[in-house]
Amino acid sequence: MNRDADAAHNLLERKNKLMAELMTYYRDMIHTATQQIPANASNSSGAINSLAMETAMTGFIRATEDLLSLTHEIRELWIIGPLTKPGAGDEEARRNMKQEAEETFNLVNALRNEQRLAQIGAAEQSPMRYHVKNLEGHPGRTQAGQVHGVHQ
């Protein structure tokens, strides 16, 4: 038998055991709840009956929780898949990690570029601007580096 067949057999066996436990505890609860207590019984008979009911109920709840845990495990195996053997798929995992790292690196660089452009745009829209004027006072060419005033 291969590994997958063993795992499926073990899960099925666990489910069958849990279902048998549930049915046993349910039978015990029904038996205890319907048991006739004689009219001349002492207080200890009622206490024993109460303790038996509490024990059966606790066992029933525990078996139900175990069954829910088993169904959760089955869903995980169904969605995620079984665990791989050590070393299996390592090369593919390395390639995937390298590709994801490159994508992350590219996204970070794009965000940095957008941030720089936003800072440049904010600086251009600042209320304080320096204007370069023509030296002769009429439109035309200006000389670089000659700042004559501040406009607000």
Image: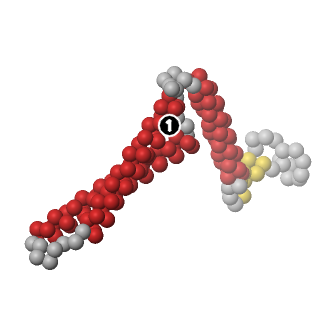
Residue 22, quarter of the rendered image: bottom left
Tell me: 47 left or right of 86. left
Tell me: 118 left or right of 94. right
Count the labels in the image.
Answer: 1
Which of these two is toward me, 115 or 86?
Answer: 86
Which of these two is toward me, 73 or 117?
Answer: 73
Vertical comparison of 95 with 104: above or below: above
Residue for point 46% across, 42% down: 12
Vertical comparison of 79 with 46: above or below: above
**Where is residue 26 drawn, in percent x and y?**
34, 60
Are there few (<14), some (14-19), or many (20+) residues within 10 Å of tag 1?
A: few
**Where is residue 108 drawn, in percent x and y?**
62, 39
Vertical comparison of 99 with 11: above or below: above
Q: Secondary structure at mark 1?
A: helix
Residue 38, quarter of the rendered image: bottom left
Find disc 1 in the rendering and name its residue.
Answer: 8
**Where is residue 121 drawn, in percent x and y?**
71, 50
Amino acid residing under circle 1: Ala
The C terminus lies in quadrant: bottom right
Tell me: 108 left or right of 63. right
**Where is residue 104 drawn, in percent x and y?**
62, 37
Which of these two is toward me, 138 or 12?
Answer: 12
Q: Can residue 91 be seen in this snapshot?
A: yes
Which of these two is toward me, 126 or 20?
Answer: 20
Q: Can residue 109 be seen in this snapshot?
A: no
Residue for point 32% across, 57% down: 25
